[in-house]
Amino acid sequence: AQRVTQPEKLLSVFKGAPVELKCNYSYSGSPELFWYVQYSRQRLQLLLRHISRESIKGFTADLNKGETSFHLKKPFAQEEDSAMYYCALSGGGTSGSRLTFGEGTQLTVNP
Amino acid sequence: DGGITQSPKYLFRKEGQNVTLSCEQNLNHDAMYWYRQDPGQGLRLIYYSQIVNDFQKGDIAEGYSVSREKKESFPLTVTSAQKNPTAFYLCASSIIDRGDRGGEQFFGPGTRLTVL
């Protein structure tokens, strides 16, 4: 079975402060990990995926297979980063194209 | 803002009634998905389909049914057997790449269902 855990339901930081949204997963095979974001009144959309190794909107995430984590980080948070963030896992194999999502973390960046 | 559309935006239903939520995509994606979004529980997969005329149960399929008669359409029926149907429902679609893995999922705007 595959499982994704986001331990923080709410996270509040001040503008310019570093931010880290935690994501841990359990999966026996070789997973593909994603971060999705939902801004207020907008659709859920992909932020980044680990295989791309990109920095999107200043965010990065590194897959740590030893710790089974995929934490999302940004060195200097901006007010426009306030949103709901979901970590997700794709296992492939018999699970095919399905994603398993975490519970989500609501990030608020205060001025 | 096309791509993937859901209708209606808001839906009210009386207890004991079945109701069908529409999901259409013009992205030529093979795979389509239905999720339920509840506060504090994230997105939970109800059903998904990787090809026309075939679909698989997700984690919370009880009380729901789907069909996939056309590549573009994946309607979800919430039946009277669903014990707690009031929720926000999201539809998504994706390509299937690298063998059996899904690509990026594209989401619709959602339907908020309220059971009265």
Image (spheres, grey):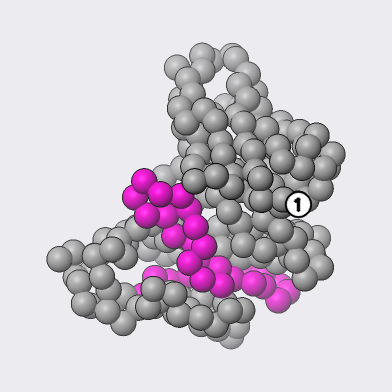
Residue B36 in view of the camera: no
Quarter of the image that includes the C terminus of chain A:
bottom left
Q: Percent x, y for residue B29?
A: 71, 52
On screen, residue A85 versus residue A107, left or right, reads right
Residue A37 drawn at (x, y percent): 44, 60
Q: Which residues are magenta?
A: A20-49
> Residue at left 50%, top 39%?
B110
> Number of labelled discs?
1
Amino acid type, label 1: Asp
Residue found at x 47% / y 31%: B9
Q: Is residue B28 left or right of residue A65?
A: right
| Quarter of the picture holding the N terminus of chain A | bottom right
Q: Position of residue B58 (x, y in %)?
A: 69, 46
Tell me: B92 left or right of A10.
right
Q: Is residue B107 above or below residue A86?
A: above
Which secondary structure, mark 1?
A: loop
Residue occupying the far right of the picture: B53
Q: Residues within 10 Å of mark 1 (few under 14, many from 20)?
A: some
Report which residue position mark 1 lands on.
B30
> Is residue A30 highlighted in magenta?
yes
Q: Report the residue at 23% width, 78% height from top.
A: A17
Res. A76 image quadrant: bottom left
